[in-house]
Image: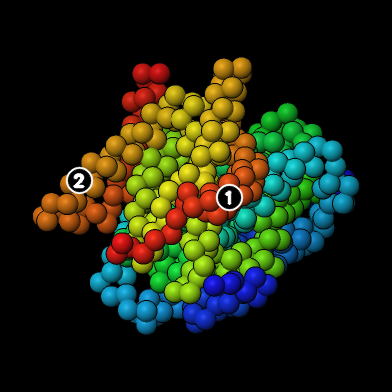
């Protein structure tokens, strides 16, 4: 009987593991180069070392909780497509929502009743479809970013001599993001609304606390703490609503 | 004061570096990411045919995500500036990198789309990217031991509400970051009032009619609302409703 490659052969292969590690090392190196360049430039622009270190400390704390949510997604994906491929997908380009969603929809698209059936019975070729779809799905953003990133950034980049319209346009993107998200969260789902308002109230309260000279350090962690508080409040709100 | 509309005019060395080397670094990463599955599949003699990859079943999945990618690039790049390249290559933008960049600018009291703002945002995004890679690596290596903790219902529930919690905490950052520069945009929010009204009405209508939420459609909504926000802001700026004034005054 012919020996057919299965999905399990691929997801457990040393080759995949090696390529994923090389890719991740590249991403870390790229981030370190960016960090060094940005750090040096901040100093050149007159931002104090103290302020940069505050930002680094706060960014570390701020990253932990969302990263742990990505870990929750990682374990959902591991059950569907093994550790190595899931680890890779959530460390690059992909977003938690995209990867977990595609994992469940792709198994039916290639003809399986469930993700468990796919893991059990899929051939290498069938898993190849999954790998390629996951790799090309989110590339559309790069079709804009790579050719037009400079133009998009310069269109709102402000300097002493910029026209006042640039100042308005620069803020419009962020305001638009909020104007879409906030009504959707507020009117679409009661628990989402309650969690968002809890996060806001905690942020406001911490802002007041940070005005106390003894608690000034709180100011660096307002966003991190209010986000954690908001997420924890969901456990309470899901019981009420 | 006229803008040179067709030529990007960066004079800041870090911004110039980002748009050259950041772009090249991103392109290399991108090629690697696309090549990776093909290398593995070729080794296992399992490369699927084009018809297997692109068909009615799979195209419907791609059609959901292609506009999301466009929407992310169009709406986040002008906010992130030079740090966009690193942000996009490491992904998880709305739930991690963008808030991290906003947090960094807020702490250093720097404004977005300025050389200072972009440099400090890049510090935040780079630290955040490294942290995520490390945390995910630890989680993947220790998956057998730690997975029970992350499969607890309470942890899963709290994780589902990351985005609403983030928006609660981000709202304060939004207002303070617009006030940290030499100039202040007055009544900037008026420009997005039409978006707020349209999205509110649609959200309420969908809730009443189906009991559901537009949360899964956010990518499409942003893509559709962005031109409305820009046009309406432009009209209000021309009519003098939105004003840019010096901070001192």
Q: Quadrant of the N terminus of chain A?
A: top right
Q: Nearer the viewer, residue A122 or B208?
A: B208
Q: Judging from the image, what secondary structure is the residue with disc 1 in?
A: helix
Q: Is residue A110 visible?
A: no
Q: Is residue A78 left or right of residue B116?
A: right
Q: Between tags 2 and 1, which lies in front?
A: 1
Give how far across and how far down residue B87 sits, in percent.
Answer: 53, 61
Residue name at image x 17 percent, y 56 percent: A216
Residue name at image x 53 percent, y 61 percent: A165
How crowded is the residue under tag 2: few (<14 C-alpha within 10 Å), some, or many (20+)? few
Which chain contains the residue that carries disc 2?
Answer: A
Residue that badge 1 annotates: B235
Residue that badge 2 annotates: A208
Which chain contains the residue that carries disc 1?
Answer: B
Q: Quadrant of the C terminus of chain A?
A: top left
Mark 2 and mark 1: span between their CA atoms? 37 Å
């Amino acid at each position: 009987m012919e020996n057919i490659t299965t999905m399990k052969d691929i997801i457990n292969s040393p080759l995949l593991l090696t390529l994923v590690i090389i890719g991740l090392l590249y991403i870390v190196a790229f981030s370190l180069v960016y960090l060094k360049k940005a750090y040096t430039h901040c100093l050149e622009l007159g931002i104090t070392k103290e302020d940069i270190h505050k930002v680094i400390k706060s960014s570390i704390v701020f990253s932990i909780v969302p990263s742990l949510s990505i870990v929750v997604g990682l374990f959902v994906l591991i059950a569907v497509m093994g550790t190595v491929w899931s680890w890779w997908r959530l460390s690059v380009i992909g977003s938690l929502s995209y990867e977990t969603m595609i994992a469940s929809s792709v198994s039916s698209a290639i003809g399986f009743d469930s993700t468990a059936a796919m893991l059990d019975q899929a051939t290498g070729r069938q898993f190849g479809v999954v790998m390629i779809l996951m790799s090309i799905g989110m590339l559309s953003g790069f079709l804009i970013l790579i050719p037009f990133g400079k133009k998009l950034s310069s269109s709102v980049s402000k300097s002493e001599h910029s026209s006042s319209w640039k100042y308005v346009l620069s803020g419009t993107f962020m305001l638009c993001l909020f104007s879409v998200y906030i009504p959707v969260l507020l009117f679409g789902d009661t628990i989402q609304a309650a969690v968002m308002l809890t996060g806001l109230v905690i942020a406001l309260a911490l802002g007041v606390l940070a005005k106390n000279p003894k608690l000034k350090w709180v100011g660096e962690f307002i966003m991190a703490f209010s986000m954690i508080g908001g997420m924890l409040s969901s456990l309470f709100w899901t019981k009420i609503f | 004061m006229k803008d040179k509309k067709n030529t990007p005019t960066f004079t800041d060395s870090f911004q110039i570096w980002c748009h050259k080397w950041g772009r090249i670094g991103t392109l290399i990463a991108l090629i690697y990411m696309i090549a990776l599955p093909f290398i593995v599949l070729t080794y296992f003699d399992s490369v699927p045919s084009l018809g297997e990859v692109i068909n009615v079943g799979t195209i419907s999945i791609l059609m959901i995500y292609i506009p999301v990618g466009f929407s992310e690039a169009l709406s986040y790049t002008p906010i992130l500036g030079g740090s966009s390249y690193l942000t996009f290559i490491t992904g998880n933008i709305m739930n991690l990198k963008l808030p991290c960049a906003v947090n960094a600018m807020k702490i250093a009291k720097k404004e977005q789309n300025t050389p200072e703002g972009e440099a400090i945002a890049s510090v935040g995004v780079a630290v955040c990217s490294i942290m995520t890679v490390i945390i995910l690596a630890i989680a993947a290596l220790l998956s057998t031991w730690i997975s029970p903790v992350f499969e607890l219902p309470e942890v899963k529930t709290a994780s589902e509400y990351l985005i609403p919690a983030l928006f609660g905490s981000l709202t304060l950052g939004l207002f303070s970051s617009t006030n940290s520069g030499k100039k202040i945009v007055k009544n900037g929010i008026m420009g997005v009032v039409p978006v707020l009204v349209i999205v509110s009405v649609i959200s309420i209508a969908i809730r009443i009619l189906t009991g559901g939420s537009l949360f899964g459609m956010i990518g499409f909504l942003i893509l559709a609302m962005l031109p409305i926000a820009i046009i309406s802001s432009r009209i209000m700026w021309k009519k003098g409703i939105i004003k840019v004034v010096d901070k001192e005054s």
